[in-house]
Each structure stands twice: as C-alpha cells, then as structure tokens.
Image (cartoon, grey):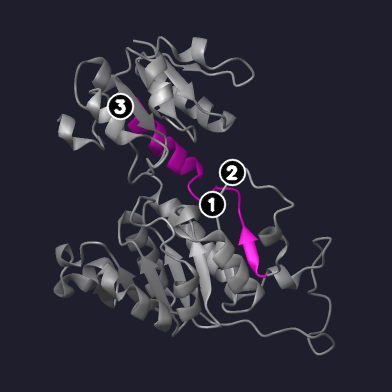
C-alpha cells in the first residue's frame, strides 16, 4: 500500500509520520521541488493538505483508494469525481473544533479590545503613554453583545459555549434548523436557532458575526455587498472557515467606507497571502496565517484519526470519517 503525503507543514508531517509508525505503516511525503507526477503515480492513498485534488490529479493515480483530507474542509477535492471512481474521501471533522473556537474568540477579543491600534508600528507597546494624552478610541465589552454564528456545527457550538461565558447573546444560522429544535437551544448554547432564510435579519442585529460553515456552491459569496451593508457600522466580522464565503472586494469596500468596524480572518482568498494586497494594508483588517486549528492537541488528534482511516482502508474497510457516504 503506497501512501503519499501532499503536505508542507514540517511539524504536522513529523506528527503524522510518528502516528503511522505506531501502526506499522509508512508514508512518503512529496518533494515539491521535484515534478509531482512521478511521485504520486503509484499512490493508493493520498493525505492532502491544500492541494486541489481534481480530475487531472486523479488521472495520474489509477490505483488510488482514498483521499484523506488533513482538516474538515473538502472544498479542494472533487468529491463527485472521486465517488464516480470508487475512491473514498475522508476528512477530520471534529479534532480541531476546540482549537478553532478558541482562535475565533481570540480574534473577537483582538478586535473588541483594539489591540492593533494599541501598539506602535514597530510593535512596541503604548502602555507607557497616558490615554489622556493621545486620541484613543475606547474598547468595547463583549458582555451584552450579540454574536451571530453562521454554521452551527461542532466548531460553531464550541464558539457558542465560550461566547455565553462572556455573557453574550448568541443567534445561530444553520442549514437545517429543524434538526436542532428550539427546546434544545440550551444544549447548543444559543439563544435562537434560525434557518438561512433568516440570515439578513440576524446580520442586522449582530454586533459580531462569526463564520463556521463549509465552503460549497451555496455558501460561496454568502457574505457580499448586500449582507455587509445590513451589518451595524460598529460590527465585526470573523472568519475562521473559508475566505471565499465572503466577497473580497465587497469586504474591502465595507472596511474602507467604515460600513463595518473591522474584520479578522484566519483564512485568505489566495494562500499564502501577498503582503502587498490592499486589504492587508487596512488598519481594521486582521489576518492570521491559517493557524486556528494548529495546536499541539489538535494535530495529535488529527493525525491519529488520519492514521486510523489509512489503517482501515489498508485492511479493506471503510474509513471512519468518510465524506462520500454513497460508497458505503
């Protein structure tokens, strides 16, 4: 069984290699300085990071049995094409939910407490300067504010838990609200559960909007010019899901024209980000480099699930976290 890793993070690769060895399995990591085709042509299993696994890649690997994504999102994989070829697609749906939720709260606090404006351009602190001597906008409390969570999956629920601890009201938008009944709101740590038809209404009431939905045909560009104009001028937008859920140009204009107060993303429209991009030059836009799920605890859990899925497929079994259920 030939297992190939299309990965570039050395820490993650080291964790995964150790997990595989514990199960008596080996993995070969692709060298991106060399041509890709001869390295993956004999692959039976691919562990994917951020590569596009499309028809052209699948054509190179006639013996492929599994494409294992290293995170929750499978938008970079042509799942339909894999399914038509009988290739399993698996992800890691829950292992980094707490890590991502904590990062979302960090970004919320970063904006609310105006940390970016609390430092000099050289990074030194302004703490030694009296606030009476400088023009400094007061920060805001989270207590009593309304948080809109778009996507009430595992990560969205973890964000809701933490928001309630800060004394926030939490309104959730989810594709299938009827699977989460109103009587179960307490279970999900939210004050209201709403369908996507209520998106505009919820956006207009929110002080903070946090995105936790997968990227697909329905969600791409979900937050565009119309939605951003509905938001309060004091509102913040948080995105730790996928950048393309938000229209880039619309967000730039909304931030430039002060239609919303700020935005903080852990994802970008084209990674890695070009530091010369105009949106990165805005004082009210924050970007972290797609690290929300990269805690030691999350990596340990993720690599363990990946190794289990690989072991199962090598024994002729179905992966535990299969995405294309049609193959079961």
Name the spot of residue 170 as percent of width and height, x first.
35, 75
Q: Does the magenta stretch include residue 211?
A: no
**In the picture, which quadrant includes the C terminus?**
top left
**Measuring 34% from the left and 37% from the top, which residue is drawn there?**
91
Residue 308 shows which numbered tag?
A: 3
Q: Which of 321 and 195 is in front in this view?
A: 195
Q: What element carries label 3?
A: helix
**Measuring 27% from the left and 72% from the top, which residue is drawn there?**
197
Left or right of 22 in this view: 185: left
Name the spot of residue 96 as percent of width and height, x first.
41, 47
Left or right of 54 in this view: 81: left
- Above or below, comparing residue 286 to residue 294 in the picture: below
Q: Which of marks 2 and 3 is nearer the N terminus?
A: 2
Whether residues under marks 1 and 3 lie with C-beta atoms below 8 angstroms apart, the answer is no
Name the spot of residue 22 as percent of width and height, x first.
38, 19
The residue where tag 2 is placed is 271
């Amino acid at each position: 069984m030939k297992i190939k890793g299309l990965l570039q993070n050395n820490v993650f690769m080291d964790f995964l290699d150790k997990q595989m060895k514990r199960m008596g399995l080996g993995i070969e990591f692709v060298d991106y300085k060399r041509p890709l085709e001869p390295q993956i042509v004999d692959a039976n299993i691919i562990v994917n990071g951020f590569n596009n696994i499309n028809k052209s890649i699948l054509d190179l690997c006639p013996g492929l049995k599994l494409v294992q994504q290293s995170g929750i999102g499978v938008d970079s994989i042509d799942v339909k094409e894999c399914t038509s070829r009988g290739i399993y697609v698996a992800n890691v749906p829950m292992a980094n939910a707490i890590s991502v939720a904590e990062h979302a709260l960090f970004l919320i606090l970063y904006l609310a407490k105006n940390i970016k404006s609390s430092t000099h351009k050289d990074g030194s602190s302004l703490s030694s300067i009296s606030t009476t001597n400088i023009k400094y906008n007061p920060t805001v409390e989270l207590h009593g504010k309304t948080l809109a969570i778009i996507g009430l999956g595992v990560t969205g629920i973890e964000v809701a838990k933490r928001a309630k601890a800060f004394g926030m009201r939490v309104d959730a938008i989810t594709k299938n609200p009827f699977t989460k009944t109103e009587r179960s709101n307490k279970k999900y740590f939210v004050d209201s559960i709403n369908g996507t038809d209520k998106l505009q209404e919820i956006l207009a009431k929110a002080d903070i909007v946090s995105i936790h939905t997968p990227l697909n045909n329905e969600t791409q560009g979900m937050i565009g010019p119309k939605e951003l104009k509905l938001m309060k001028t004091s509102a913040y937008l948080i995105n730790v899901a996928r950048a393309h859920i938000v229209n880039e140009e619309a967000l730039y204009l909304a931030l430039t024209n002060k239609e919303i107060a700020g935005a903080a993303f852990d994802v970008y429209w084209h990674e890695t980000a070009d530091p010369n991009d105009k949106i990165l030059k805005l004082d009210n836009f924050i970007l972290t480099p797609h690290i929300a799920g990269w805690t030691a605890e999350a990596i340990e859990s993720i690599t363990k699930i990946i190794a289990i899925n690989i072991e199962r497929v090598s024994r002729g079994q179905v992966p535990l976290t299969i995405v294309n259920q049609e193959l079961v």
